[in-house]
Amino acid sequence: MDNVGTDVDLSTLERAVINAFQGGFPVVERPWEPAAAALSDRGVDVDAATLLATVRDLDERGVLSRFGALVNAEAIGGTATLVAMHAPEERYDEVAETVNDFREVAHNYEREHPHLNMWFVVSVAEADAVDRVLSDIEDATGQETYNLPKQEEFHVGAKFLLDGPVSDGDLDLSHLGPEVTPSTTRGITARERDLVVEIQGGLPITETPYADVADAVGQPVEWVIETIKRFNQEGKVRRVGVIPNHYALGYTENGMTVWDVPDELLGEVGPAVASLGFVTHCYHRPRHDGVWPYNFFAMTHGRSEAESEARIEEVRETMSEFWTVDDDDWDTLFSSRILKKTGIRLDERADAQVREDGEHTTTDAPDA
């Protein structure tokens, strides 16, 4: 991924922290010591106390969305789906308010498209609730919804790297701590549910974040550390570290590129596009005949219109290695307004995956 500058005033140390710890932060009882030592080995002289204070300051200034574990809602349980809708211009704000009033709607964006100009995520604890929620939204708004659930995930996640130390963003300390054995069982136990709810908004930025979480959920710190490490290996946690606020770093151009990829080429095209460092999400989704001809989504972010256009062109060039891409085969929908952004309700989704006896339950529902 390209290394870029930033609109906020960041010191060399702050840039190093953002670059180094967007994943692979150590899951050990006192993590700041090994994290500071690893930065010092990369030529950034810092001690544990200074590193902790730096992350706390970045968080308080809004440069970070949060610090901690990025929980994978799909692996926890329940389901989410992406939904498109047309909202008439004269009723747009009214329709948006009605949609946003549904507690199952987690995110909602206005996007630039001549017809489908409202895009939102519906998150529910049980997969069979999606149809009911969409029917209720249609009744409340008088507008048809187009459900676009994820058929296949090629990539989720991106690093927003800055000019400065550790510019390759490859510092990974996830090997530290106890050895754990991943489980192949889907779902979670009752105390794992409590842990997920506690950490979904981030870890406390303290000398002993995992011990503080352990106190909050009434469990031994050893169990918290082992569970977070195991969740990381199982995919229930995508990564542990700093999660930048990409808007604060200047990534204001949010382009959802959509493509009509020949079905037989999806297995080749998906990994190729996913390998582009600036593509943050990459999915196969269904078409809707007569309304939505696209079956492949690739989300890009840029710091300017020119940068976004260059990155989208790179996606198109990658696509063109597999088939002749005509102008009618793709489009880009830029977000023009955030209408709602409350996050996935992990507590409700986790609750639905736990039986009273605390045993695992299973779920095979795809996420958004």
Image (tube, rainbow, N blue to C red):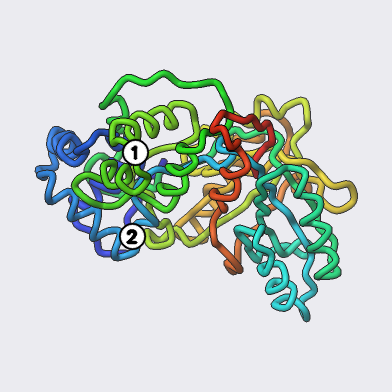
Q: For the point 62% across and 30% down, which residue is it?
A: 361
The amino acid type, in three-letter code, at marker 1 is Gln
The x, y position of residue 93, in whole percent, is 69, 77
In the rendered picture of this protein, how many numbered marks are placed on residues?
Answer: 2
Determine whether, in the image, residue 346 is placed left or right of residue 19.
right
Marks 2,1: beta carbons within 8 A: no
Rendered residue at 77%/44% (across/down) = 128
Q: Which labelled disc corresponds to residue 63?
A: 2
Taking 170 as reference, is 60 above or below it? below
Q: Going 89% across and 47% down the picture, which residue do you hit?
A: 289
Q: Quadrant of residue 108?
A: bottom right
Name the one closer to the observer, 7 or 158: 158
Position of residue 136 measured from the top left corner of the image (x, y, whole percent): 81, 62
Which one is in front, 75 or 322?
75
Q: Secondary structure at mark 1?
A: loop
Q: Residue furthest bottom?
A: 90
Relative to 301, 18 lies left or right: left
Residue 165 position (above or below residue 362): below
**Disc 1 target residue:** 219
